[in-house]
Image (cartoon, grey):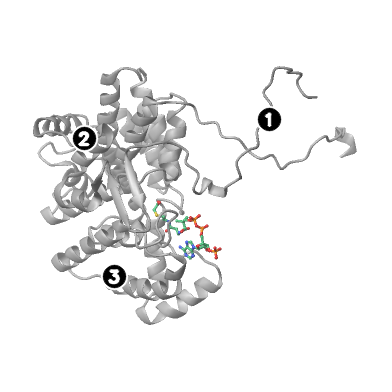
Amino acid sequence: MAVDSPTAPAPVEPPPFRPGLEGVPATQSAICDIDGLQGLLTYRGYTVDDLVAHSSFLETAYLLIWGELPTAAELQAFEQEVQMHRRVSFRIRDMMKCFPSAGHPMDALQASAATLGLFYSHRALDNPEYIVGAVVRLLAKISTMVAAFQLIRKGQDPIQPRDDLPYAANFLYMLTEREPHPLAARIFDACLILHAEHSLNASTFSARVTASTLTDPYAVVASAVGTLAGPLHGGANEDVLAMLAEIGSADRVEPWLDQAIAQKQKIMGFGHREYKVKDPRAVILQKLAEQLFDQFGHDPLYDLARKLEDVAAERLGPKGIYPNVDFYSGLVYRKLGIPEDLFTPIFAIARTAGWLAHWKEQLGANRIYRPSQIYTGAANRDWIPLQAR
Ligand code: CMC
């Protein structure tokens, strides 16, 4: 029975339904801009090309979260704060030891990120010091937790972060127990910059929806990690290497692709809702991959990937489907010796900067997300007693 509400406003015509909210603005944001026809990506007005050439991941995170490039003193203080908070409690490390070692590191990361909320449970969203503290802790501890789970699942104890190493180098050190080559550390840092932010993608939308309930920032990041894990989003970078391995050799690229297209299979690492040209991050990552191959030796999978890109340009290019960020990132990480199932957790380490920027922006002009729906179910059904079904 309808509720009697004589003062209710007259119903308004709902906007048309757009599956996946394609083209529907769901927020206003000053953080990141994408020009999908020109292939341009900017963070706070700076191109990612400039940031990769001149910045570091932590400086870029500062820019994303606080809106301006830091001064030298601000950057030094921010780096020191992050460095001071890199360690995670032995309780979290012990909890991770109880995780199944065959479990996916993204699940381990989502659980660990949420656990931080237990340790830092005093929520004070209107206190700027609380905001700074949460930003610093999350940026610092997410990477430590990813590295810790990697060692724990191999049956080893996690190693402590090294205070003398910058962010990217320290992560590679915690992961491999070896200080990385400076070129490897620089290229890994560039990868973090490239993955740090990308406007209202699925995981960032998830972060903003969660943030809009005024829950704690650890829940915000944990919900975003869960969303990033799927194969249509962050999980695609793992699948690209599996796909290249399945193709096997350059002479199999054309028949493989033709068959995949005929079967309406999605080609992993290709296509993007926002870009109708090659993703600018893929352009940069391809150059970074080549630098790594020049220094540390060639990877035959790269030749295969390039052949696939060329053939796909003929077949899928007319539909605006080109390589996205995930197409070359896996080849870079593989050359750096990173296990395939850590590719998406690394994406999460970087994207934590973007999620936190959106968390902060959402808090600045918050209204809880509560979209409508178009009901397509049954109506006015007569109750059927259990014995009559
Ligand atoms: N291979 C073949 N066809 C494709 C692909 C692809 N990778 N991507 C899109 N299409 C086709 C699709 O079949 C459809 O064709 P038609 O109109 O004839 O039915 C058309 O393009 C539109 O596809 P869509 O799935 O409606 O596009 P979307 O904007 O919803 O999806 C996407 C974007 C990224 C989910 C999709 O391109 C995809 O599944 N790509 C493969 C997975 C992948 O690489 N994901 C990483 C995305 S970038 C990193 C990130 O954001 O996490």
- Residue 243, given in percent of the width and then of the height, sits at 41, 67
Q: Residue furthest right?
A: 388
Identify residue type, mark 3: Tyr
Amino acid type, label 2: Glu
Q: Position of residue 239 (x, y in %)?
A: 41, 60
Within 10 Å of the Cα at label 2, are there few (<14), some (14-19), or many (20+) other Cα atoms? few
Badge 3 element = helix
Helix, strand or loop under label 2: loop
Look at mark 3 in the image and give the residue it sits on: 302
| Amino acid tagged 1 | Pro
Q: Is residue 172 visible?
A: yes
| Residue 100 seen in the current view | no
Does residue 380 appear left or right of residue 29 in this picture?
Answer: right
Determine which residue is flagged by label 2: 68
Q: Are marks 1 and 2 in contact (CB under 8 Å)?
A: no
Camera-near label (3 vs 1) is 1
Disc 2 to disc 3: CB gap under 8 Å: no
